[in-house]
Amino acid sequence: MTFFITQNSTLPTLRMELIEDGRHDFRKFHEAVEAADITFTMVNADTNITKVAKNKAYIQLRDNDSCEEQYVICYDWKERDTKEKGTYKGMFEITFPDDLKNDEYVYPSGVLNMPLREDLFIVIR
């Protein structure tokens, strides 16, 4: 996935959908994510230097016509985040509360890195 943003801009908000993989009870997973700490990290794809380190992110209810609630993970940009043009690799980290780490739908370490299926690239132009 590639996300484009203009240099020195704070909009649009970076939004990533949680993908239902069919292996877990997605409703339980959403409940766990609501209780989790979510951070965003962004690293320069060429130099491997971290530009954004574990800044606070959040989940938001997704607008849809389904009767099932669905969520997206969001990050609100700060001007300093987009100050330098370039291509960056982004990652969200979800850290679940200790009391959920042993549940079947939460990873044993209690930490989930996203995206899972394809890399997230941010292009600042």
Image: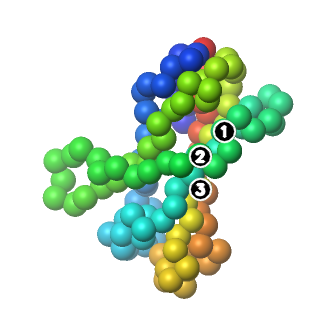
- Three-letter code for the amino acid on which mark 2 is drawn: Asn
Q: Is residue 97 above or below residue 14?
A: below
**How far across and how far down the image is residue 122, in percent?**
60, 30
Kindly tell me whether residue 53 is visible in this rendering.
yes
Confirm or deny contact between disc 1 and disc 2 (CB under 8 A): yes
* Residue 36 in the figure: left or right of residue 122: left
Residue on which the image places disc 2: 55
Compute the Cα span from label 3 to label 1: 13 Å
Query: Residue at image x 48%, y 25%?
Result: 10
- Three-letter code for the amino acid on which mark 1 is drawn: Val
Q: Which mark is residue 52?
A: 1
Query: Residue at image x 71%, y 34%?
Result: 51
Query: Residue at image x 48%, y 65%?
Result: 36
**How far across and how far down the image is residue 83, in percent?**
64, 20
Residue on which the image places disc 3: 93
Confirm or deny contact between disc 3 and disc 1 (CB under 8 A): no
Of the image marks 3 and 2, the number of the one nearer the N terminus: 2
Identify the secondary structure beneath mark 3.
Answer: strand
- Three-letter code for the amino acid on which mark 3 is drawn: Glu
* Residue 17 in the figure: left or right of residue 96: left
Query: Residue at image x 48%, y 76%?
Result: 105
